Amino acid sequence: MGASVIIAAISVTIAAASFVWGVISWKKEFIGKREIELAEKVLALFYHARDVIDSIRSPFSHSEEGKTRKQLANETEEETRYLNQAYVAFERYHKNEDLFAELYSVKYRYMAMFGPNHVEPFNDINFVVRDILSASQVLSSYYLNQYSPIKKDAKEQKELLDRIRENQKIVWYMGDEYDEIGPRVRKIITQVEKFTEKAVKRQPNFLFICLVNLEMINNSNLFP
């Protein structure tokens, strides 16, 4: 068998191997692209959710906020003012409900792509929102209790005010010293960033580059 035949056989083998591994690499790159797109989408949704939570908890509101609440019978003017104030968080949440629905819906795709151990941030952000809305609802009942005609002694009044303040710290941002929600949200965002960093920063497949180089050599004039 002549040298040219041997070289040709080697060349064909290299070309075949390049094709097979090229397909494999292309498939990996295609999957990698999908991972990157999903990771970027999830990260963007969490960033958006963080900003919306900050907006929901903003202590500044205008006079029209909270007025979509269905009023109770025989509310006093003072009760209406405080109950509307407690309802502001619900109004702001409902305006951004689609964002949290989208975040929840993409959770299962994300788990399927990256594994079930990545579900924790989705659950945690849901718990944060739930706690804010729950505290807002509790505030309403405390406000009604505070302004009810039933007399309270000094101890009962103090306990009620303490409970109101504790729930206000959850619903509203009242400074870093009293903030419980902000650190929880930052921890969630940090976790999502770590989960998505590998996919977002993924580099081109090294094996694919090598195979491309082999194909270029095979098609060159190095072999007669």
Image (cartoon, rainbow, N blue to C red):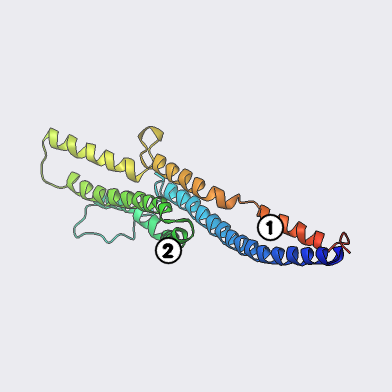
Q: Secondary structure at mark 2?
A: helix
State which tag comes first along the sequence, 2 or 1. Answer: 2
The image shows residue 95, relative to residue 85, as above or below, that is: below
Q: Amino acid at mark 1?
A: Phe
Looking at the rendered structure, the kind of residue marked 2 is Ser
Residue at 45% from the left image edge and 61% from the top image edge: 112
Q: Would you say residue 85 is visible in this rendering? A: no
Cα distance in 3D space between marks 2 and 1: 34 Å
Q: Crowding near pointer 1: few (<14 within 10 Å), some, many (20+)?
A: some
Q: How many marks?
A: 2
Which residue in the structure is indicated by mark 1? 208
Residue 146 image-quadrant placement: top left
Residue 220 placement (x, y as % from top left): 85, 62
Residue that numbered label 2 is attached to: 105
Decide which of 186, 19 is in the foreground and name it.
19
* Horizontal relation, residue 48 to residue 178: left or right: right
Q: Are marks 2 and 1 in contact (CB under 8 Å)?
A: no
**Residue 213 vs residue 197, the one in the foreground:** 213
Q: Nearer the viewer, residue 99 or 209?
A: 209
Q: Which quadrant of the structure image shows residue 208? A: bottom right
Q: Quadrant of residue 22?
A: bottom right
Q: Position of residue 141 (x, y in %)?
A: 21, 50
- State the quadrant of the C terminus: bottom right
Q: Secondary structure at mark 1?
A: helix
